[in-house]
Structure formats: structure tokens, C-alpha cells
Image (cartoon, rainbow, N blue to C red):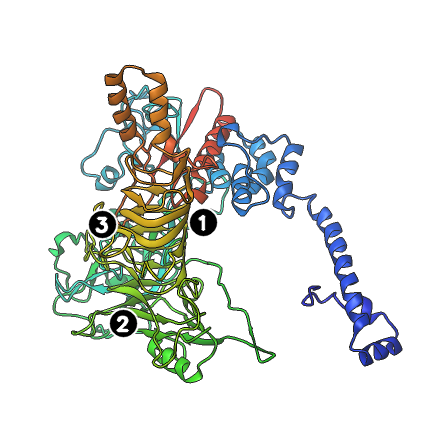
Amino acid sequence: MPNTTDPRIDRLYRLLPAIYRMRDAEKKYPLQALLRVISEQVNVVEDDISQLYENWFIETCQDWAVPYVADLIGYRPVAEAGPPGNLKTATGDALNRVLVPRREVANTIRYRRRKGTLALLETLANDVAGWPARAVEVFKLLGWTQNINHTHIQRARLVDVREMDSLDLIDGPFDRTAHTVDVRRIDSHRTKGRHNIPTVGVFVWRLKPYSITEAPAYCAESAGPHCYTFSVLGQDAPLFIHPEPETDPTHIAKEMNVPAPIRRLSFDAYKERYYGPDRSIVIWAEGWPNIDSVQPVPASAILPADLSNWQYTTPRDHIAVDPVLGRFAFPPGQLPRKGVRVTYHYAFSDDMGGGEYTRTILEPSPRIIDGLSVDPHFYRVGRNEKLHRIADALDQWKQDAPADAVIEITDSGVYVEPIYIELGENQSMQLRASSGKRPTIRLLDWRTDLPDALSISMSRGSRMTIDGLLITGRAVHFTKRDVPGVAEEIPERVCASDIVIRHSTLVPGWGIDCDCQPMRPAEPSLEIYNVQARLMIEHSIIGSIQIHQNEVTMDPIPVTVSDSILDASAPDKEAIGSPGSAFAHATMTIRRSAFFGIVGVHAMALAEDSIFMDCVHVARRQIGCMRFCYVPAGCRTPRRYRCQPDLVVTAVKDEISDLARRAAAIANEKLRVTPQFTARRYGLPGYGQLGLDCAVEIRRGAESTSEMGVFHNLYQPQREANLAARLDEFTPAGMEAGIVFET
């Protein structure tokens, strides 16, 4: 069928004389249908000719043409970054965009003209790797005896213990204190040095800043009614800078130009640059004395402080803010009478879980009912919407009883209410956040005689989507809907429903304390009871999954996990399992994910580019395979291809024949390639990020030579290799430039 949405589809038909169009209408438009097919092919040829012109320019050319344009100006890809990806796949296209960055190609000639300048190294980090950076000439920080005829007052100074801000910056990218010489090279493949005469350090920040806008704060009642945290989950989380753009290409980045954690001393000295609308932090205190509830608390009322152990007593008419812990406190006798809202910035590696980032919205298609096209019903919930509660939208949905419905939350508020959804046959619902918003659903202990959860009952042909939400306090519970007096017409062995969870966070352990320890580590975040459905999880962070299925009457349910983290909160807990059974009755398909906890499933159709930190037990080993994964030794899995530590163990066996030495070497190699993470606790900025000391077999062990695990698609090894090669190319002769990762 031709694309009838193209406005050019009828241009040939409109050229016909009116008499032919009238005759064609009498015969139900067969001529129009023919000319539409011809017009579609004409449009394809015309678009292709237009695109040929666009492909002459780096700004408008297609992705496949970027390497060819680059070759015309003598640009050479970096061999150490790895081979190019398959142009026929989305993953291959993403890899090629990293290997040959369009922005770098566009600016290559300008780079050559600016070769040898310090600011160029920062620009390279942004354009080549996409990382904010600060370049530092380290020789200016070396301690040396100055010539009295040519003194540098601000250089080579001994430590002044009275300058607290300088002490706070020692060994960081903004260090101002003199150091003794370190003869090790900054680009060494072994132990890197830093302070040497020819050294230039390029400090980069890999974690991205994400905003939370006008969201309710969390009252830490256990510490006192005047104590609050910026995070709605109540954990201590450092606040990050909302970077200010650099307008001058020769400017060297300052602290306000990079997504670094906010320091207490810097916040105290430059409070107006951190606090206020369009800044890093804002607080609204409704009902606080002398404060308009519509306007934020003025900067003059903000008092930087250290709120460790909540020992600081805030003076009247002020709010104490600790950006390092993400805490703030009111005066004990001067509390807000209504709600407290905050805007702040946190840091994370990529767009995953519930967050205020732009994401693709999957709109449900119109459904044909009785020959008519019926659009889905939309119910918008939010502070500025007609509906203010999710329950109000559900009540309206029950009255309308549409075939397809979307409940969209349009703000980043917290919704504390019981939610029960019953989907009828062939009904579908999306419970989602607007793009760029992160609402929180906080589930409480509403009933004393029954467990509480976000409960969803599924029927034959129903579809439920949870998109862009953060859910805490209880689990999400899916059950089969039983209709009295109605028999099930289809066998239970057929998958009758769909469950989709995308870009959402189901908090591991139901919640976390101030130290990011799970509140209920033994409790699952997602439960599926006797629902014959397909479960799809994308770009999400989820706690333990428990699947309750009748293994006699039901086939294993298909479960697909991609670009996600499943966290059981402890190595001895189940990331995927079934109560009372060794295996969950499910067939897994896993791509680019990380699992913290035991995985016990019926079968694993495919697992690739993923990390399993703890035991994996698969009942049917004859089905499927695992490829380019890390799986602990001794696990029961299907056949494995190029997995770790299998490869290093095989290498040791081929190299060492003595059994005693071989056993010791194998143990050492297994320990060496065990994945290391910046943080394994949900709520910390580096959660799920591979550590800098992680073995290269893991950091470059995926099929595309990128890293295994959930952040595979960031292609950070390729970015690092590209940047290192370009720094070496554009650094002046005799100088050594090296990359220093700040986050």
C-alpha cells in the first residue's frame, strides 16, 4: 500500500482533467489508486536525488556517508577503537557514529589550525568522546625555586593551611597547590603518574547531570520533622552542578562549566551561582513564614552547612543546605506548614530508569472496531491538569471502558495512593510519564489484612505498559483476572497478554535508607502470578522478579530484558526466581544487561553482552546459548561462546602444563576478570558503572569490543581510544597528554 500520508501522493492525479477525475469517482477511484502507486515511486526517486545533494555536506549527510566525507579531508579512524559495526543494524549504526564522530569530522580542519593550544584539548574531549573536560598544564603545579627577577606569585606555592578552599581542591582538576615531581608518565599503560614537566592532564566527567524539577522533598522524620533530603527516596545523594556553557572557544573550563559534585565551600562562596531559577538548586517551602508559596525561597535565606548526623541547628528565617549529602534543614521551631518542593541535579551514566530525560513515547495505534478507527483515550494527571490523582483517571477510565487508554502523568510529583487496575479482554493501558518528567508512585501499607502493591489484573489479549515511572514502597503485582461464570476459551499454553516495563525504576528492596542500603532486601519488586504473558523490560532498573506459574498446565513465559539492571540487593538473593521452586518458569532473552543476584530460570534462549555477578542456574541447558557474557565459574548454563572467565581459563590451560601452577594461575585469572563496579548500590551516582580497575576482558569483552553490561551502548572504550589518539595527534611535540576520569 502506498504511503497516503505524504502530501505529494496525489500530485499526478490532480494534474488530470476534471472529467477523468469525475469518471474515476464513479468507478470508486481505480485510476487514483494506480497513480498513487506511481507517485510513490516518483517520490522515492526524487527524495534520493535530493539526498545526494545533502550528502555533499557533513552537517546534512546520512550517517553512512560520514566516513567518506572524512576521507576527503584526510581524517583517519583510530584502529585501537575497534572495527566498524554492521550498517544494517541499529547497534552497528550507533557504534559507527562513535568511531567516526560527525562533529569531529566537521571541525577537523579547524583543529589543525589550532594545534598546540590548551583549549583545543577540551574541545576534542567534547567533540570526539562527548565528555565535558578541563585541560590542565601540570608543570604550573610543580614546586620549584623561583627567579627573584621573574616571580610567579600564584605558582609553585607551598600549602597554606588557612586557605580551606585550596585544600579542598587538592589532587582534583582545579588544584592550585604545588606538588613534587612524579616521573611516571600520565599516559602509561601501567601505573599513571600526573605531576611532571611535559604532562598535560585532560580531566573528563563521564556521568551526565539529570534534573528533578519541582518534586516533593523527603522529610526524614526519624531525624526530626525539620530534616529533609532532596531525594524523594530519602538517601544521601550528592547534588551536581548544572553546567554553564562556555561561550569563548579559548576559555578553559571552570568548576561551573562541568557536571561536578557541588562542594560545600564553593557553595558558600558562590551561592548565587548555584541557587535560584535555572540554576542547580531551588527550594519551595509552602506555608513558611514570610515566604510566598509560589516563589522559591530567596538565596538570602539559604545557609550552606555541614548536616552530617543532623547536628547543625539552623538559625531562624534560614534553611541550611548541605550539597554533599543532599540534605537541608529548617529551624526546629519554624517548620513549613504545607509541602516542600525542590529542584536539583543528580548524576548517572545514561538514560535509564525513571528520569527527566527525553525518551521515545510509544503511542498506541488506533484500533479498528466494527469497521471504524477508534483512537485511544487519554487521561492526563498532574498539578496543572484537570485530574490531580491517578485514582481519578482510573475512575474515569472505568466509566468510559475504552479498548485502549493512556494515563499520562505530566509532572514530577509524588503520588501516594493505592492503585488497582483490571484489564478486560483485548484491553490495553499505558501508565506513563510525559517525556522529560519523572513522577514517583509511593505505595504504602494501606490494608492490614492483605498485602499492598500496585496490582494489575490481566485478561486474554490485554496489554499493560509502565513507562517512565519510579515506583517505591511496595511491589508491582500482576495476576490473572478471573471472571465468574466465564470459562477460558484458549489454552493456557498460549501467551495471551503483554507486560511492558520501559524507562522505569522499581526500587530494589522497595526502598533505600540514607546509606543506600535496601529497606526490604528479601522482597521482590515485580511479581507475576499465573499470567500467561510476554514480559518485556527495557532501559529499566528493577529489583527481584518472582514468577509464580503452574509448570504443569502452562508453558514458560517469555521474558526479554535489554539495557537494564536487575538487582536482588544481595548476592544470596534471587534476581529472577520462583518461591518454593529452584527455577522460575520462564524462558529468558537477555541483551546488554547486568544482574546482581541469583538467576534461576527454566531456559535461556539467548544472553549476550551481559554480566551475571552471581549464580546462574538453567533447568534446560539444551536450549539457547550465552555469548560474550561474564558468568561465574561453576554455573549451570546452556552452551557458552566467548564468555568469561572461560576464555582466560582456557588460555591458562594452554600455557601452563604443571597442574599445581595451573590451578593457582586459574584462580588468579578468575579473580582478575571478576567485574568491578564504581558502585553496586542503587541510589549512588556510579551505580552499575564498570570501575576503572576492571579487567580489559570485561571492559572490551562484548561482541562489538565495547564493555559488557548495561552501559554497552555508550561505547566508552571506543570513546577513550579515539580521544587518546586525538590528544596524541594534537598535543605539541615533547608534551604528554593523558585522560583522567573524574567520574
Which amino acid lies under the numbered mark 1 shown in the image of this protein? Pro
Which amino acid lies under the numbered mark 2 shown in the image of this protein? Val
Quarter that holds the N terminus: bottom right
Estimate the spatial distance between the alpha carbons at disc 2 and disc 1, rounded to whole Å: 38 Å
Residue of label 3:
573
Which amino acid lies under the numbered mark 3 shown in the image of this protein? Lys
Residues at marks 3 and 2 touching, judged by CB atoms closer than 8 Å: no
Question: Looking at the image, is mark 1 or mark 3 nearer the viewer?
Answer: 3
* Mark positioned earlier in the residue sequence (3 or 2): 2
Residue of label 2:
416
Q: Secondary structure at mark 3?
A: loop
Q: Position of residue 684 (x, y in %)?
A: 27, 49
Residue at the image position 36 percent from the left and 33 percent from the top: 644
- Residue 76, compared with residue 86, is above or below; it is above
On residue 245, the disc is 1
Along the viewing direction, whichever of 628 and 552 lies nearer the viewer:
552
Characterize the local packing of mark 1: few (<14), some (14-19) or many (20 or more) Cα atoms within 10 angstroms.
few
Question: Looking at the image, is mark 2 or mark 1 nearer the viewer?
Answer: 2
